[in-house]
Amino acid sequence: MCEYRPEDLRMAELLFPQVTKTPAELEESRPKRNLPEGAKVTRFAPSPTGFVHFGGLFPAMVGERLAHQSGGVFYLRIEDTDAKREVEGAAQSLIRTLAYYGVNFDEGVTESGEVGDFGPYYQSKRAEYYHIYAKQLVKEGKAYPTFTTKEEQEELDRVDKKQENKTKDWHEAEAARKEAQNAWRAITPEEAEAHLKAGDLFVLRLRAEGDAEKKIPFTDLVRGKLEIPENDEDFVLLKSDGIPTYHFAHAVDDHLMETTHVVRGEEWLPSLAKHLMLFSYLGFKLPKYMHIAQLMKLDESGNKKKLSKRDMGANMEDYRRLGYAPACVTEYVMTLLNSNFEEWRTANPEKDYTEFPFSPKKMSVSGCLFDLDKLSDVSKNTIARMSAKEVSDGVMDWAKDFAPEFYAHLSANPAMSEEIFAIGRGGKKPRKDLSRWSDAKDYMGFFYRQYLEKPVWEEKFDRAEIADLLNDYLQNYTLDCDNSGWFDFVKSLAEKHGFCPDTKAYKADPAPWKGSVADVSGFLRLAITGKNNSPDLFTVMSILGKEESDERLRLAISACN
Ligand code: GLU
């Protein structure tokens, strides 16, 4: 047991008369985690600002992977200590958004309330805990109050310690700051009591006995070995309303909630020295840290810049509306998170991404480049691997909210929609027409008469000729055969009308022909689908049925006039 100085004890009593428990007593009354060796406890700890940034999905997925890959726990803590920035309902919408991307929490804040023994999981409900540790720091002489006005406080925090070029002005400001700080450091319990009696509010600061010239070796799981200058700033632990700063709350919460791995954005790296000091002053075991590189994008001039809130693709809420399947987005995030993911995916096309052995060591240190084209590419491949039912359901689910008329067509006959999406699926070279659900209407909307476009015939062919050919086809074709039988018929029809039945032979010697069988297929495709590109035409007609195909041929013939 350490000996407290009487003046520190008195100061602690004056500042925190309501706190009766010691940290030891608190911790004794708290549950302990009982997890197998190697199980990681991670958390996602957003401030509920109502905006889920694509960059937020990063640490969330890393935390989720690390915990669940190791049989550990992933929990959600809401860092709502800044009431000014808070948005009503933001936590709930964040939970729903993350759940939509398959990021689920075992513990913490959930849609139906708080789950788990380590709560409360809202920082705003944890004042009691912060104050217990704050009082202890004061008792040990490691923290002291400053009863400053806002202006005086700004003066204390004014000097930029990291300023490279330390000018004469800087040194003067620093000397003034030091003097003010030393004066406050020497505050006596009597002075504090007088302030308290006068109703003055105080800010609690850490008495930092560090030396910025000294470097502490530190290993970050993403960034490797680092050297951090020791903290020499008497930074704020509790603000004048008794609410902790991020630094203090981070130490107390991650200690009490037994976080083993802190996964957070690299913007916290400059504060790390403060956290190392806090954990040491508080006697807490230091968790492992992973500082994740920020998401970058290329601007118009090709320079890398931070993906900002206003950038296309930054807001996670947009993805659903734009029709990106959650599986595509998570797949894309995995390619950004681990450099070897794509190689693994090629070798394991059928596996769920959660089977990939995620490793912090394979993460980028310099910043990942966010690229919508790459997202599109990854999405096409991801959708190509899905079953027809998954695609059909995905499209319908999207259309229900964002394209109700299209949804009405799809949902009137879901079996047909599934049949359509089954075309060209599977096999060695699956079709890759969709990168988003919202591409579906363009791709297969022509199946519904309402979206069928009028054929636009190529100028180089005589319209009467096309009409004649379509008419002959209409009178004589059958769908009661297989694809190759049908194509044999198309070839013979082509030849009959002066179109070469063999495209290779046509290329070698086009002169005797009006065109080739490819042109004839093109007329039929345009007649049936209104498009120059479509999935396999025979299958399309089989799904449409003879009657509807006939009707479309008749319409196309009349469009030749
Ligand atoms: N509330 C902090 C933020 O949103 C959390 C950082 C952390 O994960 O520790 O940036």
Image (cartoon, helix red, strand yellow):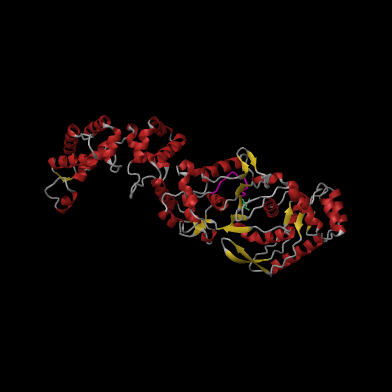
Answer above or below: position of 158 versus 459: below
Place of residue 164 in the rendered image (x, y in percent of width and height, measured from the top left): 63, 67
Position of the C terminus by quadrant: top left
Tell me which residue sits at (47%, 41%) in the image: 321
Residue at the far left in the pictured view: 512
Place of residue 422 in the rendered image (x, y in percent of width and height, measured from the top left): 35, 40
Tell me which residue sits at (65%, 41%) in the image: 114
Q: Is residue 240 visible?
A: no
Left or right: 282 with respect to 325?
A: right
Whether the magenta-drawn stretch holds residue 51 is answered as yes
Q: Which one is nearer the viewer's eye here, 121 or 197? A: 121
Position of the N terminus by quadrant: bottom right
Q: Is residue 442 visible?
A: yes
- Image quadrant assignment for residue 151: bottom right
Q: Main secondary structure of the magenta part?
A: loop
Q: Which one is nearer the viewer's eye here, 341 or 449? A: 341
Left or right: 26 with respect to 305?
A: right
Left or right: 472 with respect to 381?
A: left
Place of residue 200 in the rendered image (x, y in percent of width and height, measured from the top left): 81, 49
Answer above or below: position of 557 versus 217: above
Place of residue 372 in the rendered image (x, y in percent of width and height, measured from the top left): 45, 51
Whether the magenta-drawn stretch holds residue 423 is answered as no
Q: Which residues are magenta?
A: 44-53
